[in-house]
Amino acid sequence: MTHRSHALAAALTALGLFTAQTAAAQTYLGVDIAHEKLVFEPEYRAFDGAPNVRYDNRASGTQTSLVGGYQTAINPDFSLGLQGRVSISNTDWTLALPDPARFRYDVPVSLAFTVLPTYQISPRVALFAETGLAFGKVREQKVSAVTSSYNSEKWRPGLVAGFGVRFALDK
């Protein structure tokens, strides 16, 4: 099964505790809430030699994250940061068929470790890009009394890429 996750680049809500932007280095801790879109692409192979069948299953919901990081100034306008994120999600894809079969796919927990180059527009506002690695706990479940059943939980790697705007609360 292939899994792709897309979270909006700009968080709907971001609460951060930031030190002064003029400092050479800063640490921060915050919470963000984002709209999330998940795409699950299961592929089924038949033992009788029939062609593989691939499905495109989409779901959306809310992802909430605890975010922390360290940022250091390269010059007055540019800085570079390292960030960690632990996220929980209520997004899942489900389907019940008259077979009877029931499918459920979700990624309830994920971790991300990223690098953030940042351009400071003003003392309170900054633009940033984000790139790094992520790991998600992917759960896949199928229950069918007639054909087959499976229940799988695996941590799978992924990539993070995005951009956003940050507002300092202490200016």
Image (tube, rainbow, N blue to C red):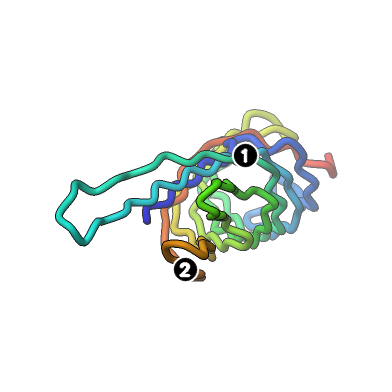
Q: How many marks?
A: 2
Q: Quadrant of the N terminus?
A: bottom left
Label 1 secondary element: strand
> SS class of the residue under badge 2?
strand
- Measured as percent of width and height from the top left, residue 113 is found at 52, 61
Front label number (2 vs 1): 2
Decide if residue 103 is in sight here: no
Say above or below: 19 vs 39: below
- Quadrant including the C terminus: top right
Confirm whether residue 98 shows in the render.
Answer: yes
Q: Amino acid at mark 2?
A: Tyr
Q: Residues within 10 Å of mark 2 (few under 14, many from 20)?
A: few
Residue 21 location, quadrant: top right
Instruction: From the viewer's perspective, tell me whether residue 166 is left or right of residue 77.
Output: right
**Mark number, residue 150:** 2
User: Which residue is depicted at the point 85% across and 44% down?
Assistant: 170
Q: In terms of depth relative to the viewer, which is nearer, 131 or 79?
A: 131
Q: Residue at x 64, y 33 (%)?
A: 165
Q: Which mark is residue 18?
A: none
Cα distance between the residues tagged 2 and 1: 23 Å
Residue 14 x, y percent position in the rendering = 76, 43
**Residue 80, x across and y down, in percent:** 52, 50
Question: At 40% across and 47% down in the image, what residue appears?
Answer: 41
Q: Amino acid at mark 1?
A: Ser
Between 141 and 167, the one lying in front of the other is 141
Quarter holding residue 84: bottom right
* Observer-nearest of 138 and 7: 138
Does the CB distance between marks 2 and 1 fall below 8 Å?
A: no
Image-based side of 107 in relation to 2, left or right: right
Pointer 1: what residue? Answer: 60
